[in-house]
Amino acid sequence: MSETYIVLLGPPGAGKGTQAAGLARSLGLPHVASGDLFREALAKGTELGMKAKAYMERGELVPDDVTVAMMLERLAKPDCAGGAILDGFPRSQGQARALDEALGARGGGVSRVLYLRVAEEELLARLGGRWICRDCQAPYHVRNQPPRVAGRCDRCGGALYQRADDSVDTARERLRVDFRETARLIEYYSVAGKLAEVDGEGRIEDVAEALVAAVGA
Ligand code: AP5
């Protein structure tokens, strides 16, 4: 089976969303982001959104059973038949095992895991200055990646907003939770021989180039 599943791993603010869109375009795969799916469900007021709300507001992980069910349902859609760029999932060893089982049952598996390494101080600066498109979720940054027209998305013209969980206190809690879980995932995927580490602190274009090289490495 020739499916390509690329996992983008990295702390909040590492640039997963920024890089996933370009990588998805260059590999011809859909970009599937667990955080975007949760925020969409929240905005629509669905049962899934209500389940995720309190966890997201506190900067904690949504329980594995809820997250895995949502992601496997998304990955079963026809546009993911050839694979996907996974952004923000898996985020725990339980999720990684569930993904392996589901892909294994289809005769496939995760192809490559790209870990974006960025220092904590830089992550907080990125999250504090981030703006997101309400319509297409494209991320911007007041200093590092400003939109051409203030408050408007370059790609679709949608209105930009700041995520509630990017406030300093919630961002710190997200980084704390992530530090614990990501260390376990790094171990899990390096034992499987799938992990490639990429310096996420360069210019956006340079990081993009390094990621493409790491996919084929
Ligand atoms: P999620 O939406 O996945 O958030 P996250 O992992 O915290 O990641 P972010 O979206 O904050 O960061 P990013 O790495 O995508 O960075 P970005 O590209 O935007 O999750 C939100 C919540 O949902 C979680 O807290 C949890 O509650 C829940 N959730 C989601 N998935 C879950 C799961 N699997 N299990 C359980 N719960 C889950 O970049 C950040 C900023 O930096 C931008 O402003 C950008 O312009 C700028 N930037 C990017 N690259 C560079 C660069 N190279 N140089 C300078 N600036 C840059």
Image (spheres, rainbow, N blue to C red):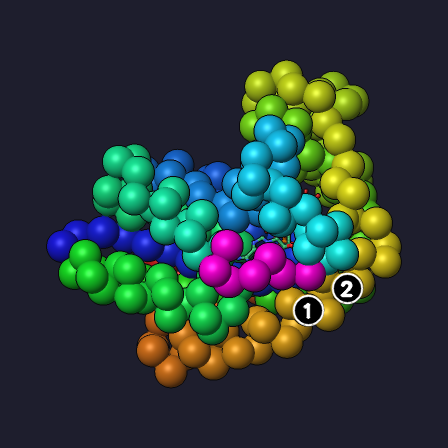
Q: Residues within 10 Å of mark 1 (few under 14, many from 20)?
A: some
In the image, residue 86 sits, relative to residue 164, either above or below, namely: below
Q: Is residue 55 left or right of residue 121?
A: left
Instruction: Choose between 60 and 172: the one closer to the eye.
Output: 60
Question: Disc 1 marks which residue?
Answer: 177
Q: Secondary structure at mark 1?
A: helix
Instruction: Choose between 13 and 102: the one closer to the eye.
Output: 102
In the image, residue 174 sits, relative to residue 160, either above or below, namely: below
Q: In the figure, residue 120 lies in which quadrant? A: bottom right
What residue is drawn where x is 84% and y is 49%?
Answer: 167
Q: What residue type is disc 2 on? A: Glu
Residue 155's spot in the image, x, y percent?
57, 23
Disc 1 under 8 Å from ligand 1? The reply is yes
Residue 200's spot in the image, x, y percent?
60, 59
Tell me whether circle 1 and circle 2 mark residues in contact (CB < 8 Å). Answer: yes
Q: Which residues are magenta?
A: 60-66
Q: Which mark is residue 173?
A: 2
Magenta residue check for 97:
no
What residue is drawn where x is 68% and y is 34%?
Answer: 132
Q: Residues within 10 Å of mark 2 (few under 14, many from 20)?
A: some
What residue is drawn where x is 65% and y is 19%?
Answer: 158
Instruction: Choose between 206 and 166: the one closer to the eye.
Output: 166
Q: Farthest residue in the top direction?
A: 157
Residue 175's spot in the image, x, y percent?
72, 65
Instruction: Choose between 11 and 91: the one closer to the eye.
Output: 91
